[in-house]
Structures are given as C-alpha cells and as structure tokens.
Image (tube, rainbow, N blue to C red):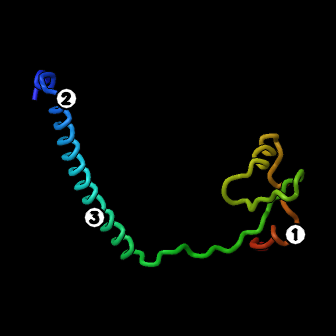
Amino acid sequence: MEGNDLKSMSSDELWELYEDVAAKLAGKISAEKAILEERLRKIESAAQVTRPNAMRRPYPKVLPKYQNPKNPAERWSGRGKQPLWVKIQLQAGKKLDRFLIAGPSVLKGRRAG
C-alpha cells in the first residue's frame, strides 16, 4: 500500500484498517508472549532440577570489631562495605586499628601464634 492510497481512503476505511492492524498485532504479541512464557517455564523447571531446594548455608553471626568513638552505637564487623563513619575517619588520616573494640569480640576467631 502506498502513501497515496492512504490519502484517498475515507476516515471509515482508515479506521477499519487501523482495527485490522491492531488485531493482527495483538495476536502476534500474544503468540510471542506464550512462546516466551513456555521458555521461561522450561528454564525454571531446569533450575529446580539442578538445585531442588537450593538454600544458602547458614553463616554464623559476626560480632562487631570496630566502633565509632564519637557514637559508640555505630559498630562495624569489618566485613562488607565500610560504613560512612569509617570512610570519613580514614580519609582524615586515622588508622583503622584505632577503632578496634577491645574485648572477646575482637580476639574471637584469632589464633594465638
């Protein structure tokens, strides 16, 4: 269909053409969606077969190792992302050892040697 054909069509004919195109597109979209959903079901079932009850192993609770001297309620275990207060103190030139919490929580897990 050329551009001149569309210009010569009445608004009723154009509306009918629009409805035909919209219906065909909706049919194609639903067919593609069904195919994709089937693929997703296959992937999910394959994942369940390889790891039926895949759960993370339980990790022991990690006690805090460092404490903010300005706010003792702010503590950090030394794992994961550094808290903002640690970053600020380190940028100010202070050493991380300065914030160690004295006591069994720091010594626990360390071997004498």
State the residue in front, 21 or 76.
21
Instruction: Report how far apart the C-alphas of labels 1 and 2 lie in the structure.
Output: 84 Å
Residue, x 19% and y 29% (percent of image)?
A: 11
| Kind of residue sitting beneath label 2 | Ser
Residue 85 against residue 13 in the figure, above or below:
below
The reply to whether callout 1 and callout 2 are in contact (CB within 8 Å) is: no
Q: Which mark is residue 11?
A: 2
Q: Which mark is residue 50?
A: none
Q: What element carries label 3?
A: helix
Q: Residue 103 carries which label?
A: 1
The reply to whether callout 1 and callout 3 are in contact (CB within 8 Å) is: no
Instruction: Report how far apart the C-alphas of labels 2 and 3 lie in the structure.
Output: 40 Å
Q: Quadrant of the N terminus?
A: top left
Residue 99 against residue 64 in the figure, above or below:
above
Crowding near the residue tagged with mark 3, few <14, some 14–19, many ≥20 C-alpha atoms within 10 Å: few
Q: Earlier in the sequence, mark 2 or mark 3?
A: 2
Q: From the viewer's perspective, tell me whether residue 36 is left or right of residue 77.
A: left
Would you identify the image quadrant in which residue 74 lies?
A: bottom right
User: Residue at label 3?
Assistant: 38
Residue, x 77% and y 41% (percent of image)?
A: 91
